[in-house]
Image: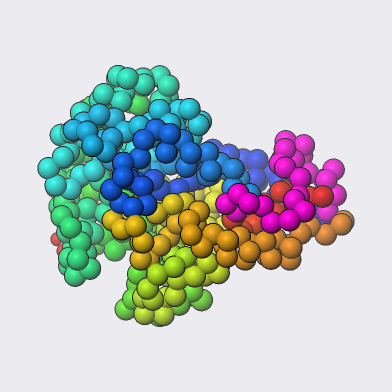
Amino acid sequence: MRSSGLLAFAASLATSSAVYQGFNYGATKSDGYTVRAQADFESLFSTAKSLVGASGFTSARLYTMIQGGTTNTPTSAIPAAIAQDTSLLLTLWASGTTFTDELAALKSAISTYGSQLSGKVAGISVGSEDLYRNSPTGIAAGSTIGADPATIVDYISQVRTAIAGTALSSVGVGHVDTWTAWVNGSNDAVISACDWVGVDAYPYFQNTETNGIDQGASLFNEAFDNTKGAVGSKPVWITETGWPVTGKTENLAIPSADNAKTYWDQVGCPNFGVVNTWWYTLEDTDDSATPNPSFGIASAPVQVFHQAAWEDQERTLPRPEVAQAQLPLDLLDQPPPLAQPPSRPMLPTSCLARSLVLWVP
Ligand SMILES: *[C@@H]1O[C@H](CO)[C@@H](O)[C@H](O)[C@H]1NC(C)=O
């Protein structure tokens, strides 16, 4: 029956609040060099929380503990997250020679913010794609310096020592890498050292395969499933995935707002609220004023994205028989439907669960 189905559905939504959901945030603005200050992070975290049609984007994955332009001052994303009630997946950059400074910044953040961080840290990642950058695929793709498995394992143990007995002592320590690194048995020691594993997967970049948007979800699911198979019983989080809104074609993969939306629907929606997910991304953080490809859904082509989302929303507006009374009251604290497309950044609502909740008349 419709009503019992809806209630079961609403119950499953209600239990999903403990799952982290958010975006990735670099230390610099989309131009790739202007350092993000606390106000910049706060503005982004606030935007992420107020997307029309997509609620619950209240977590931020970072790439470094160090504030841009300093040696080892903790990132201003931390006070921004505290102010905006946003949780953090912290990262210590683990390639090159800055790990000692990353560790110092972590210790300094703990002593500066202490208990304000309790319950706010989703995890601590030691590195990001270091194994990938060290692999033949990474080198062929022009990657900069990476790190080998033994180095990551050593750094993980240093982080465990640093957080022991502090406000962050119960936070899980892990590593983020591409799915290709996780299925490589030579990296098994890293899996063993982790509490959780983060996977980055981009069908768009899989340019030696049939990678059009129509294959996007199946390529992602294959990468995710293969990673879970390699990792075994430890949690696997989605730390980066997305489809570019503009930029160059990679084999059959064409960037566009429509394709980014399709990918969001087919890959994001089934995982939001189910698996910890940090989407790539809200706003680009690249080494160019005109990132190519651009993954930032809140930047230039957003109007197109809005339009696609809006049209989709019209199609999925709840039918009259879906009465407000059938949903628990605490799920109805959303703004009423708008008469025209909103001006704020907006995401597609064809995650059906969400459109029912958000757009009940
Ligand atoms: C597998 O991992 C090892 C250790 O990280 C690396 O040296 C090697 O290049 C990787 N192989 C492939 C095919 O990526």
Residue drawn at (14%, 47%) of the image = 96
Q: Colour scheme in the image?
A: rainbow
Judge whether residue 171 can be spotted in this image.
no
Judge whether residue 32 can be spotted in this image.
yes
Taking depth in this image into account, of 109 and 132 the one nearest to the observer is 109
Taking depth in this image into account, of 218 and 293 the one nearest to the observer is 293
Is 298 positioned to the left or the right of 53 in the image? left
Residue drawn at (31%, 23%) of the image = 110
Residue drawn at (82%, 50%) of the image = 361
Q: Is residue 279 above or below residue 47?
A: below
Quadrant containing the N terminus is bottom right
Residue drawn at (22%, 53%) of the image = 130
Is 234 positioned to the left or the right of 183 in the image? right
Percent from the top left, x then y, of residue 326?
Answer: 82, 45
Using the rendered view, name the quadrant where residue 252 is placed: bottom left
Is 278 positioned to the left or the right of 93 in the image? right
Percent from the top left, x then y, of residue 123?
Answer: 37, 37
Percent from the top left, x then y, of residue 27?
Answer: 32, 43
Taking depth in this image into account, of 134 and 62 the one nearest to the observer is 62
Q: Is residue 102 above or below residue 2?
A: above
Is 26 positioned to the left or the right of 298 in the image? left
Percent from the top left, x then y, of residue 30?
Answer: 37, 52
Q: Is residue 328 above or below residue 184?
A: above
Using the rendered view, name the quadrant where residue 319 is placed: bottom right
* First to last magenta residue range: 322-346
**Magenta span contains residue 165:** no
Please identify the residue farthest to the left as the structure is shown: 97
**Magenta span contains residue 337:** yes
Image-quarter location of ligand 1: bottom left
